[in-house]
Amino acid sequence: MSGFGAITARFYAWFNRNPPSNRIVIDVAELGPDDRVLEVGCGPGAALELAASRIGAERVAAVDPSPTFAAMVAKRVPGADVRVAGAEDVPFDDGAFTVIYTIMSMHHWDDRDDGLATLTAKLAPGGRLLLAERLLEKPGHGITPAQIAAVEARLGELGQTGVHTVRRPDRRKTLAVVVSTRPLAS
Ligand SMILES: C[S@@+](CC[C@H](N)C(=O)[O-])C[C@H]1O[C@@H](n2cnc3c(N)ncnc32)[C@H](O)[C@@H]1O
């Protein structure tokens, strides 16, 4: 499912210990002290470490289908609840989180529509979902404008409100973050 075996994961972590994209997403998320946060596809855990530094490790959780990444992050962010799982089978209760985000992971998912349905179900009423990918011209390891439109439409079908995409400079590329909110009454 993950495509990141133990060696690939260690190689990726070596080059991506603190990627700027991870800070961008945590800034866009505007975490507050009462948030309960889930990162999906956490990789080496830079974003989770930042989130924990802002609101406390006991308020953050993460999933990644790679056992190597999950073990790395459990060590990097002591106190966080880190589990081996994918976006399609998140092992937490529905409504458990006020913020769920994913960074450069969605293009790896086996079934994007299923993953989005799972993640929106895990949001508490009023909770925010942030989906970050590098903006591309053609399909690949990122997201094209046509794929953004499809994701935004799917979020609308799932009842999410305030669906919009923010774009931020990320090294010499652009990071697209699709943001949406679960309605207070649903
Ligand atoms: C390019 S890495 C990004 C890692 C990290 N978010 C970052 O920004 O450095 C993609 C991540 O997605 C994870 N992944 C792959 N398939 C997944 C799935 N079905 N659900 C959730 N995460 C998945 C991989 O294991 C990997 O950690």
Image: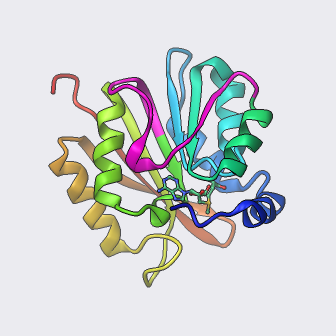
Whether residue 70 sits left or right of residue 61 in the image: it is right
The picture places residue 183, in percent across and down from the top left corner, at 22, 30
**Residue in the picture at 35% in, 60% down:** 112
Based on the displayed image, in which of its 4 quarters is residue 124 positioned?
top left
**Residue in the picture at 68% in, 63% down:** 5
Q: Where ligand 1 lies, by quadrant?
A: bottom right
**Residue in the picture at 36% in, 41% down:** 119
Whether residue 101 sits left or right of residue 77 in the image: it is left
**Name of the residue lying farthest toward the right:** 14
Q: How is the structure coloured here?
A: rainbow
Q: Quick one: 136 or 44, which is closer to the camera? A: 44
Up/down of 18 relative to 137, above or below: above
First to last magenta residue range = 78-100
Based on the displayed image, in which of its 4 quarters is residue 15 positioned?
bottom right
**Name of the residue lying farthest toward the top:** 34
Q: Is residue 111 magenta?
A: no
The picture places residue 93, in percent across and down from the top left corner, at 38, 25
The picture places residue 129, in percent across and down from the top left corner, at 39, 41
Quadrant assignment for the C terminus = top left
The picture places residue 158, in percent across and down from the top left corner, at 19, 45
Up/down of 126 relative to 134, above or below: above
Based on the displayed image, in which of its 4 quarters is residue 182 positioned?
top left
